[in-house]
Amino acid sequence: MAQTTNKQGGWLKSSYSAVASDNCVEVRLTDTAVGVRDSKNPDGPVHTFTHHAWHAFLHTATTLDEHRR
């Protein structure tokens, strides 16, 4: 899955989301954490995770997806 970058602050959104669509979550990686926000509400809350927690989430999500195929 490719990513597109929001020029305002380095937020990433899946290229599967239409460019004009706000129906997605955005992710921002920093040296110390991973931020996740709702693209419909960019000024709203940002959920922050450690890199370890984010990696564990992605691993679990992709593993569950593989088992459903």
Image: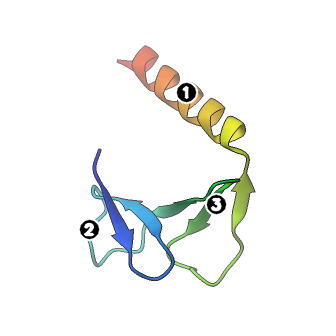
User: Looking at the picture, which amino acid does disc 1 mark?
Assistant: His
User: Looking at the picture, which amino acid does disc 3 mark?
Assistant: Gly
Q: Is residue 9 above or below residue 11?
A: below
Q: Position of residue 12 (x, y in %)?
A: 43, 63
Residue at position x 41%, y 19% from top?
Answer: 66
Residue at position x 40%, y 62% from top?
Answer: 13
Disc number placed over residue 18 in the picture, else none:
2
Which of the image's four quarters has the C terminus? top left
Q: Is residue 22 left or right of residue 9?
A: left
Image quadrant in which you'd find residue 20: bottom left
Residues 41 and 50: in front is 50
Image quadrant in which you'd find residue 17: bottom left
Q: Earlier in the sequence, mark 1 or mark 2?
A: 2
Q: Position of residue 37 (x, y in %)?
A: 60, 67
| Gap in angstroms between the C-alphas marked 3 and 2 | 21 Å
Q: Earlier in the sequence, mark 3 or mark 1?
A: 3
> Few, some or many C-alpha atoms within 10 Å of disc 2 (few <14, some 14-19, many ≥20)?
few
Residue at position x 44%, y 26% from top?
Answer: 65
Disc number placed over residue 35 in the picture, else none:
3
Q: Is residue 42 left or right of residue 24?
A: right
Disc number placed over residue 59 in the picture, else none:
1
| Gap in angstroms between the C-alphas marked 1 and 2 | 25 Å
Residues 50 and 31: in front is 31
